[in-house]
Amino acid sequence: MKKKNIFVIIIDSLRSDKFIGSSKTSHTPNIDKLIENGIYFCNTVSPSDGTLFSWAGIFSGKYSFRTGINLGRFSKVDKKMTTLFHLLKKNGYDFYGHLPEVASKIGLFPNFKNENVFFNKYVNFEDGLGQQIINELSSNMKTPWCYILHSYDLHFPIKIPEKFDEIRYGKTKYERAVSSIDYWIGKFINCIDMKNTLLIITADHATHINEIEMGAETVNTKKIQMLDSIAPKIGRIIPEKLLPIKSKVFFALEKRRKKQKEKFVSKLNLKPHQLRQILFQRGDVDKFLYDENIHVPLLIVDSKLTHGTKIDHLTRSIDISPTILDIINSEYKLENVDGVSLLPEINNKKSEERIGFIENTPLIQKKVNLTIGIRTSKFKYFRDKDDLTKRVHLFNLIEDEFEENNIAASRPDIVEKMEKFISKINYKNNSKITTIDEKESKIIENELEKLGYD
Amino acid sequence: MIKQNMKPNVIFILLDGARWDRLNESKEFQDVCKKGTILNNVSTAMPYTIGSINVTFSGLFGKENGIDGYHKMLRLKKSIKNLPEIFQSQGYFTACDILTKNIIPNRGFNIHQTHNEFKDDLTKRHPNFVKQCLKESNGKPLFLFLYFSKLHTVTVSEVLKKYEWDEKEFYDNKDKNLSRYDDAFKEVGKYTKLITDELEKLNLKENTILVFFSDHGTGIGERFGERNYGSFTYEETIRTFFLFIASGIQKNRASNTLRATVDIFPTILDLAEFELEFDRPGESFSKYLLKDEAELKESLYTFSETGAVHGPWPSPEESNVFCIKSSTHKLMYLKTPNEWLFFDLQNDPYETSNIFTGNSEIEKKMKEKLIGWINRED
């Protein structure tokens, strides 16, 4: 039986609550229609808050730390690791795609059949990329094909096409950019035969939005971030060898901007989660794993699957690859992975409660304090990557959806359960120390002596 | 349970090395027992202080809490929350006065102090310490852990400092050793009476859960190789007692139903009425203490392990002696010589006759359970 084509659209930084739901103000007729015709997973978490870590997880079915991507600075994924692409290739698939340049450097993606796969991250659909994709999708791609598209249109600094920069397309810049993306998704879908295509729309991670809606007004730090608007232009012309200098300048400016922002928000009566949105900056030393970082949309559209279904159970981006393989009826499966196929659940089979391990992606240019944690359908837990007693956060997401009330101190039982989960997945930082060093031996010796053992 | 809307104080008092079968030697201790319910057949998971206390306070066996050997005394896993940490998280003022600072880590303690067993008079020091804690707690309920070390001091100075582990003279003088032990226990009894009276004077009687307990027993020469405790898992060292005293707890009651020290953790959390859900192996018996259940449910099996510092098969890095105990039998495995021992506790309570054949159904079942426990995954 001929295999279905696969179209994976990853929208960088797209949040679940801005894809569907009451807090969304964008205009997205195409996405809405796809949701009506597909299966939407309301509670999907990405394995990390950064693109490379998430890609590694999505396409391997493994938690990012197991893929090799985290060894040292940004490195390549483990060469020996089996990915979705290896198995699709065995199933006879050809690969097409459009991805930001960095994707060419991490050893994860397959050889693509089309040209000009990798684009500068400041290039948006409106800059010609959208048309390029349409051309490719309309061309005679050899079936079965797998098309991987990663859009940077929502990545800060956001650049909105003029025609979408109106209130009817959303209250904030971010929302308007979502409307613009919807327009292009509609165009892409029109180019393909949806009857024979499995469509996945998701995000690599979510993001903070530096604009807060307060009634009819929006609060933002536009003036403070003026430089952001020219960043794409500068970004494109700076040669690679000058990038370290650019980074230094960037972080120096970030520091200054942070102070200005803090002064600005001190006059406003903002809630903790709103403050987080406004004050967040890429260069922050302390990283966190709030849902605005990792709660992503996941939509699966396939003509053969039930339409208009919404699934509330916790799902993970690492479940995407096993699910794709299951839906296309691949005889090859990803083995020894953390992700599971969501197909049984799509087919109304009861699933076990899942947990999602989450971790910060390090910054390449600067040492920052990273966290790791666990997301369940009820709780969010994260703490310092290296020390489980530091920066411990626990939130009851049912009672506190914006993660404002840290209950870690009063619920040591839940904290411990979460640590057990971390220990169970064998996070490499938790490896046991088995040898007793000289200092420890001395203490033990003294202690035993005091207890009467000579 | 204690007073409506008030969190009860919790005071653990360790009577280090107290043997369950010598409690009658002290009239004072018998008087104190009348104030509460005593469980006198509680198997300690590890018959030495550091291992035992950390099991009791974490509700987890050594493998799971990190301290499964004398040399692992500093290895309590950070991810494990023990009683002091939990009580502190629930708004308690937590303090301890112990023999050495590594008996239990300072995690979760507002005050973590040690005494000098040879110089300090604990009959004065501990009441004063309670007063100090009441003062410093600013109205918070107390979680206290007091360590009464008299038996330890006598064992160290009269046994460990005088005899080598293989010195015949010690094992030849069991009666003398027992007499010395009983004299020391009388001091323990006096202390328990005194501290109970002092707590009453401080108006702590009505709203306090007081727990007197032993971490392990003490050998007096019954087995060659066991000068004190920690070498084997015979009854004289693994059988311990827990005496619970509080206003809602049944008075003047004793039970010899088999239980384990891992049961203390969930019991105390229940008595304190914390709405927390820890995933621990023990089972609470708070309902029995509070008279909601007439009978104390018996543990089918309890497990103990040790690895001695001295003796014929020292193994301070990891346990090499294991046992499983039911209300009627005990199966012991000595890993180093690869030897199995089986005792009928009903007909041979002092475990003098090893009846291991490996063939009986009871032996087979207990062996399977014990091997499963030893090889369990962490």
Image (tube, rainbow, N blue to C red):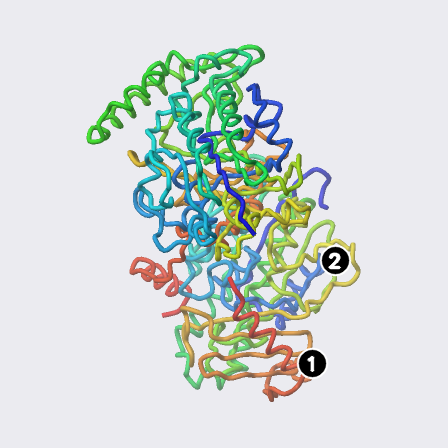
The C terminus of chain A, quarter of image: bottom left
Q: Is residue A255 visible?
A: yes
Q: Does residue B48 appear to the left or right of A237 in the view shown?
A: right
Name the residue that disc number 1 marks.
Answer: B346
SS at circle 2: helix
Give the mark, 1 or 2, whose residue is nearer the N terminus. 2
Name the residue that disc number 2 marks.
Answer: B288
Q: Residue furthest left?
A: A241
SS at circle 1: loop
Q: Looking at numbered disc 1 in the image, what kind of residue is underneath it?
A: Gln
10 Å crowding of disc 2: few (<14), some (14-19), many (20+): some
* Viewer-proximal residue among B315 and B202: B315
| Residue A118, horizontal then vertical, whole percent | 34, 34
Mark 1 → mark 2, Cα distance in angstroms:
25 Å
Q: Are marks 1 and 2 in contact (CB under 8 Å)?
A: no
* Viewer-proximal residue among B92 and B125: B92
Residue A75 falls in image quadrant: top left
Which chain does the numbered disc 2 sit on?
Answer: B
| Residue A74, horizontal then vertical, whole percent | 31, 42
* Viewer-proximal residue among A38 and A319: A38
Q: Does residue A445 appear to the left or right of B278 in the view shown?
A: left
Q: Looking at numbered disc 2 in the image, what kind of residue is underneath it?
A: Tyr
